[in-house]
Amino acid sequence: MKLTYLGHASLSVNMGGKDLIFDPFITDNELAKNIDVDSLAADYILLTHGHADHVADVERIVNNTGATIVSNFEIVNWFAPKGVVGHPMNHGGKWNFDFGTVKYVNAIHSSSMPDGSYGGNPGGFVVW
């Protein structure tokens, strides 16, 4: 497993031969000013909640890589009309992906999308 900090709450993880990105906020992020968002590899993008500083680069990365997003039902549905393929998860649920297992766990925070719409309950991920 290889972990790379991308700034703010963003990181990339390579495991099981797949590239995962958590909460991609690269563009306009001072902590990621030396990272070229178009050069990032991603098979999956895991999103904890809908705030712009966690989802800002989702569409761009998906357009470049064809990545699938993993998040709660509301976030996956918000991105669907934009052509983004997603795997919705419920709190406490787990799924065996082709790189390993993901369990979606509770988080305490707010969650609204960049347009102000409701982003569902925020969550976290345990990945193994």
Image (spheres, rainbow, N blue to C red):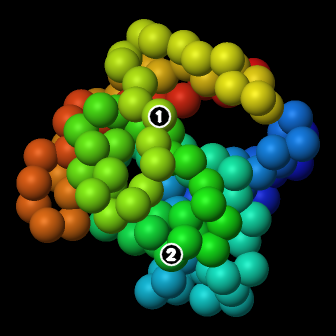
| SS for callout 1 | strand
The N terminus, quarter of image: top right
Specify few, some or many for label 2: CA neighbours under 10 Å numbering under 14, 14-19, or 20 or more.
Answer: some
Q: Is residue 128 left or right of residue 21?
A: right
| SS for callout 2 | helix
Q: Is residue 8 something one can see in this rendering?
A: no
Does 112 appear above or below 98?
below
The percent position of residue 67, horizontal first and vertical second, equals 61, 55
The percent position of residue 107, horizontal first and vertical second, equals 35, 29
Which residue is labeled 2 in the image?
Answer: 60
* Disc ID at residue 87: 1
The percent position of residue 35, horizontal first and vertical second, equals 69, 83
Identify the image quadrant of residue 53: bottom left
What separation in Å lies between label 1 and label 2 (alpha carbons)? 18 Å
Q: Is residue 47 something one can see in this rendering?
A: yes
Q: Residue at x 34, y 33 (%)?
A: 72
Q: Nearer the viewer, residue 42 or 51?
A: 42
Q: Residue at x 78, y 59 (%)?
A: 4
Q: Are marks 1 and 2 in contact (CB under 8 Å)?
A: no
